[in-house]
Amino acid sequence: MKGWTIGVLSDEQRKSLELAVKSYATDVDYVLPYLAQRGIGKDTALSRGLGYVSSPTIPEHRNVRGRLAIPYITQFGPVGITFRCIEDHKCREIPKHSKYMNPSGQLQLLYGVQSILSDALDIVVVEGQIDEITVSDLCGIPSVGVPGSGVWHPWWTHILSDFRRVFCLTDGDESGEKLGRKVQKEMGSKAVVVPFPAGEDSNSTYLKHGSDAIREMIK
């Protein structure tokens, strides 16, 4: 994977990614207890290619051992992987430690892009991969996840412009407010920003109140 670029992947890079995703998925049982706490079962985990890094298969992954592997899957196969810490601690309080890690040179990617190919008139934007899985797979609502409130690429605006409305379910914190403002600015009149109460997000709301509560927010 040396020389990773943010453009089109080479055949070698694509094959390495495919092998990594398959390898990490074979150890998905290690992360099922964590995923179960988020309402995500094994079938959903497997359909998303989620896995666990017990033995890194690519040199760029050597520092992500013990993390949840979240691949970005398109109709052409995987195009990237994000690695999430699943330890029971506050990541921000640990020096030189991040909750999420990406291989060096990997572009910040939109998660759940298969939803863009659906026949739905509207789509939902959320922050993070777990929230996207919650809204799309657990609630049955087409959605995409941005990797952070401050990340937005111009081509995302173009991709989402074909939808009638773009609902943005924002976390109930400062980061959520930032994302809402960003989506409102980029999508204009198509954007419908729907904030969660303080301290809540898509996944926590689903766990407490079920999928109907999420659907009710975007009527």
Image: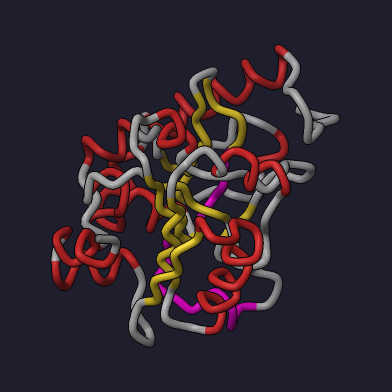
In the rendered image, residue 26, in percent from the top left (x then y), is placed at: 36, 29
In the rendered image, residue 141, in percent from the top left (x then y), is placed at: 28, 47
- Residue at x 34%, y 37% (from the top left corner): 120
- Residue at x 49%, y 52% (from the top left corner): 145
Q: Is residue 116 magenta?
A: no
Confirm whether residue 98 shows in the render. Answer: no
- Residue at x 63%, y 21% (from the top left corner): 16
Residue 29, picture quadrant: top left
Against 182, residue 3 (above or below) is above
Residue 207, picture quadrant: bottom left
Residue 5, picture quadrant: top right
Against 149, residue 120 (above or below) is above
Confirm whether residue 165 shows in the render. Answer: yes
Q: Is residue 13 toward the left or the right of residue 34 in the image?
A: right
Q: Is residue 92 magenta?
A: yes
Q: Is residue 169 toward the left or the right of residue 213 in the image?
A: right
- Residue at x 43%, y 42% (from the top left corner): 52
Against 167, residue 77 (above or below) is above
Give the residue furthest to the front.
189
Tell me the magenta residue range: 81-94
**Quadrant (top left, top right, bottom left, bottom right) of the N terminus:** top right
